[in-house]
Every structure is written in structure tokens, then in C-alpha cells.
Image: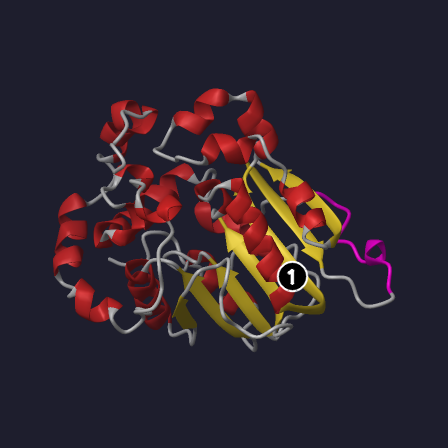
Amino acid sequence: MAVRKDTIFERFLSPVLQLFIDRDGLEQFYRSIDWETESDRFRNPTLVYPVYYSTQNFHGVEKGYLNPRAAVSYDPITQYVLLPNETLIRQAAIATVQGKPRRILDLGCGTGSTTLLLKQAFPEAEVIGLDFSPYMLVMADYKAQQAGLNIKFIHANAEQTGLLDGSFDLVTASLLFHETPPTVSRAILQEAARLLKPGGEVLILDGSQNTLRQTEWLTQIFEEPYMQAYATGSVDAWMGAAGFGAVQTQELWWIHQITWGIKPLPGHDPESARPHPNSVRIDDSAVPDTGFPAPAFE
């Protein structure tokens, strides 16, 4: 059983953030939903949670993402810690996509913040969000309905999705790898390679491994059991080992990184297809008027 840790966030940052978060409003929203009934719409009864997931109190929430309260608190916290602006960071990652994907899979979609923006960026595409937590999927679906977006959400393991080989043009994962052991992150990339069509793209948004290695205190802000292991690894190397080509990582605002790769076409040199050579830059114009600032509910 995981024990809650006295993190930097709990000691110093949480009291400050409480001044900006409508706790009464969040509690009212939490009580307005029958979480078990709603989660049953997504729940896969055959899904077995691995120990690395089921025994951790992610972000200090008891039972982590298997607690519906995590689904309610995630967006209000993330909007203040994904600096300088959550929507801008997620949009900057999406802006690195080269093609016009027709089928998109967002692994570890959580409350659907990136999933919704993907559908907004590629409105003609079929977009699917996949997550381990049925409660996070309830929130993601709520947000999609509020935004009038047609998105399918699946309760599944990102390591073994059960989806068809070569059935997607784009596979993404945002803020997922720092919450999984490196062996799992590598397995997820192997699964992404299986799911992608030749020429398909993979896109990973997460914390800057370079910055985290040099600034140890950043790995101790939240209760993140796998953050230090993530920091010592290399998403570039993991992608290469999974068979992706033209892999490129760009740092964004010092604390974030965007890693892109492509599944090689048979008989083609993957190095011939690269993202735009310019560094990703955050620009308010990159966020459409109908963006989804967090929290995505009132």
C-alpha cells in the first residue's frame, strides 16, 4: 500500500493554489455525478490494473487515478503547473504534427485536454482517447460533450490496447511517461509502432528530461513515483528502440519537451521526413477561440 508523501507541493504550493481554486464548486461538481454509474459506461470488466498503477497515490490522491476525486482535481491543478499556459503547451505539441491524420489515438488521455484539442485541430479525423481510469474517462467525455465534439473514449491498457495493427495515422501521449516506469513507457511506444500505419506519426509531450536531470527538486514537487526514473531516461532512445525514425526532441519553456517520430515506410529512409526545422514557439494565435482552458467546467 502506498503511503502519502510530504512533497514540496503539499508543503508550499498547495496552500497557495487553494486561494485560486473554487473548492466548494469542485465539491459540488463531484457530488453532482454518480461516478460508479457513469464510469460503468466505459469500464472494461476484464481489465487488470498492474501493480505500478493500482498501488500509487498519484499527486497525493489516495488510490491515485482509481479515485474519482482525481478526475475532478486534475484540471484545476494542471492549469497552474503546466506553465506558462496549459492550452498553449498542448497546442504547441500538436503543431508539430506534419500530416493530416484521419485516425488519431491519444494514449493515457486522462481528462481529455489534449484529446479535445486534437479533435479541434483535425475536425475531420476520428479521434479516440484511451485511459486506465474509468473516472478520468467520465470527465473527458463530459468535457467533449460540453464542447460539442464527437470523441470516442476507451478503457484500456496503453501497453496492450487490443486495437488493430496499422489502424492509426497519429498516436499521441501527453504527460504520461513520467507517470509510468521506463519499461512501461518503452512498451507503450512498441504498441504505438504496432498501431500506426507506415508513415504514421508518434507525438509525446512530457517534462524535459534534460532539465529534470539537472534540477532534482523538480522531481520532488508532486507525489510522482516514477519521475526520477523518467528523468534519467531518454524518450529519443526509447523511440529509436521501438523502430521510429526521424526522431526529434524540442524543449519548450525549459521544463517541457516534445518528442516526435515517424514509422518508416517500407523501403524508405525515415530521415527524409522531419518536423519543421524551426524550434516550437508559443504564440497566442496558435490557440483557437474555442480552446479549452482548465478547468473545462464551471
Q: Residue at x 59, y 41 (%)?
A: 257
- Note whether residue 31 is visible: yes
Measured along the vertical axis of the image, is residue 125 above or below residue 177? Answer: below
Looking at the rendering, which quadrant does residue 264 occupy?
bottom right
Residue 269 part of the magenta segment? yes
Q: Residue at x 45, y 46 (%)?
A: 86
* Residue 151 image point, x, y percent: 43, 73
Measured along the vertical axis of the image, is residue 128 above or below residue 107? Answer: below
Q: Which residue is mark 1?
A: 193
Query: Is 47 left or right of 163, judged from the image as shown?
Result: left
Q: Residue at x 72, y 48 (%)?
A: 240
Give the image's coloring scheme. Answer: secondary structure
Q: Residue at x 46, y 34 (%)?
A: 227
Q: In the rendered structure, which segment of residues is drawn in magenta? A: 268-279
Q: What type is the residue that disc 1 sits on?
A: Ala
Query: Is 109 left or right of 201, judged from the image as shown?
Result: left
Looking at the rendering, which quadrant does residue 94 occupy?
bottom right
Query: Is 265 left or right of 139, judged from the image as shown?
Result: right
Query: Is 172 left or right of 34, judged from the image as shown?
Result: right
Magenta segment main secondary structure: loop
Q: Which of 50 and 29 lies nearest the eye of the viewer? A: 50
- Note whether residue 285 is visible: no
* Residue 289 image point, x, y percent: 46, 61
Q: Quadrant of the N terminus?
A: top left
Q: Quadrant of the C terminus?
A: bottom left
Q: Which of 126 and 245 lies nearest the eye of the viewer? A: 245
Measured along the vertical axis of the image, is residue 137 above or below residue 226? Answer: below
* Residue 42 image point, x, y percent: 32, 71
